[in-house]
Image (cartoon, grey):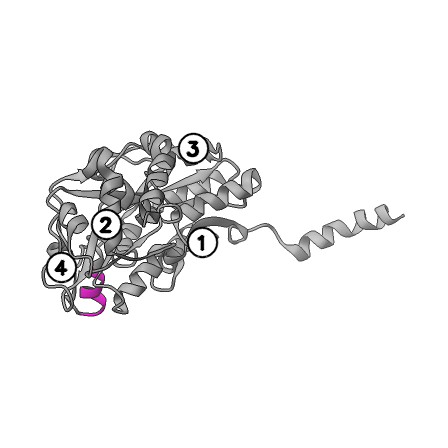
């Protein structure tokens, strides 16, 4: 009897509910917190993509790219993520090893990044070279090389990030290794005398720096552009290192459990398209990987342009990362 009544009601219920619409589609995107901040690219990317897709983006954010990968590992195949934005080339071999990601099948022919990086799973969407950013009001003679940073005046402090939890921290670890090779532990033993503190992520480190807690911070060559464009100030500058700079290439990927893979692919295509590429430099303060709809602000023409770029292969990072972190921990804890 109940089934008969339910059967009779179904047409009416269908009319009340109405047909499924494109607006019912939701894309869940995992990323880091500064991407989704009100001043980050997230809001403008949301606005632009939702206009084109007739869908909704559900952002889920964590502190940093390293933490992003950690969360995915904890959630396992049951993760709700359709797309992940904010890993970098130093993490992608480990990310692939989880088995969570599918080939993107996105056209990346218009992308151009230092070293010509390309991958069938992960799509680059921005890049930036790591740099020591300094306060010109408190530091008149910044280091001009990694050697000068390591061996410089211990009273002139720097704030750095933890390589276990932060992609910039991992970048600095690999940068020191690229310059010093097997002598990296000794270099860290000297550098630790200049380290004011080690923070879990970039935001905490940069916040301490701009509050005047230290005259230097590990950040990016692009960071001064933010202050020039947003604050109309050239107080903060990036030091140019004679040995070269390590590059971070940030990537996005589609999970194997994505509910709507064509929608996820459309999002990645939008992310590397002219509109989003025009947004990222002035919100994420990184360099675009493809032609943008609008030219970069003039401030970007004044930035440090490294003559040499360091970039370790993802496989080498995966196999050597733990050993390098163990060396770092031993050096930093030594009295």
Position of 30 compared to 91: left or right? right
Q: Nearer the viewer, mark 4 or mark 1?
A: 1
Residue named by callout 2: 191
Q: Residues within 10 Å of mark 2 (few under 14, many from 20)?
A: many
Q: CA distance from mark 1 to mark 2?
A: 29 Å
Magenta span includes 212: no
**Residue 231 in magenta stretch:** yes
Q: Position of residue 150 (x, y in %)?
A: 19, 48
Tell which circle, 3 or 2, labels the residue nearer the N-terminal end: 3
Residue at position x 46%, y 49% in the image = 29
In x, y percent, where is residue 281? 25, 54
Asked which secondary structure carries label 1, the reply is strand
Dot in front, 4 or 3: 3
Q: Is residue 183 above or below residue 141?
A: above
How far apart are the two marked residues, 3 and 2, measured between alpha carbons? 33 Å
Is label 1 or label 2 in front? Answer: 2
Q: Which mark is residue 113?
A: none
> To which residue does mark 4 refer?
298
Query: Which numbered disc, 3 or 1, marks the residue that appears first in the sequence?
Result: 1
| Residue holding disc 3 | 96
Q: Kindly check if marks 1 and 2 are in contact, taking CB atoms under 8 A apart as contact.
A: no
Using residue 260 as the reference point, say whether residue 33 is left or right of it. Answer: left
Q: Where is mark 1, residue-wise?
A: 62
Which segment did they paint magenta? Answer: 224-232
Front one among 290 and 182: 182
* Sooner in the amino-acid sequence: mark 4 or mark 1: 1
């Amino acid at each position: 009897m109940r089934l008969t009544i339910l059967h009779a009601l179904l047409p009416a219920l269908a009319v009340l509910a109405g047909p499924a619409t494109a607006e019912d589609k939701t894309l869940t995107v995992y990323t880091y917190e500064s991407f989704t901040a009100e001043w980050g690219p997230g809001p403008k990317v949301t606005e632009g993509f939702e206009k084109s897709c007739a869908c909704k983006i559900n952002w889920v954010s964590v502190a940093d790219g390293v933490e992003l990968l950690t969360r995915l590992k904890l959630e396992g195949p049951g993760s709700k993520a359709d797309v992940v934005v904010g890993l970098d080339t130093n993490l992608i071999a480990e990310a692939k090893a989880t088995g969570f990601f599918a080939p993107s099948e996105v056209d990346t022919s218009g992308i151009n990044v230092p070293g010509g990086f390309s991958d069938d799973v992960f799509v680059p969407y921005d890049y930036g070279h790591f740099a020591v950013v300094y306060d010109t009001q408190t530091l008149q003679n910044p280091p001009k090389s990694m050697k000068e940073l390591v061996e410089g005046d211990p009273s002139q402090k720097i704030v750095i990030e933890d390589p276990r939890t932060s992609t910039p921290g991992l970048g600095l670890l690999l940068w020191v290794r690229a310059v010093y090779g097997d002598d990296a532990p000794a270099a860290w033993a000297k550098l630790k005398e200049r380290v004011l503190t080690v923070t879990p992520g970039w935001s905490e480190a940069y916040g301490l720096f701009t509050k005047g807690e230290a005259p230097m911070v590990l950040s990016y060559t692009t960071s001064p552009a933010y202050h020039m464009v947003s604050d109309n100030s050239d107080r903060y500058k990036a030091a140019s290192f004679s040995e070269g700079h390590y590059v971070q290439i940030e990537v996005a990927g589609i999970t194997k459990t994505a509910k709507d893979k064509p929608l996820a692919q459309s999002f990645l295509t939008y992310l590397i398209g002219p509109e989003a590429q025009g947004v990222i430099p002035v919100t994420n303060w990184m360099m675009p990987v493809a032609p943008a709809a609008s030219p970069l602000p003039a401030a970007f023409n004044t930035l440090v342009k490294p003559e040499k770029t360091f970039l370790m292969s993802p496989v080498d990072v995966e196999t050597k990362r733990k050993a390098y972190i163990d060396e770092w921990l031993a050096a930093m804890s030594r009295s």
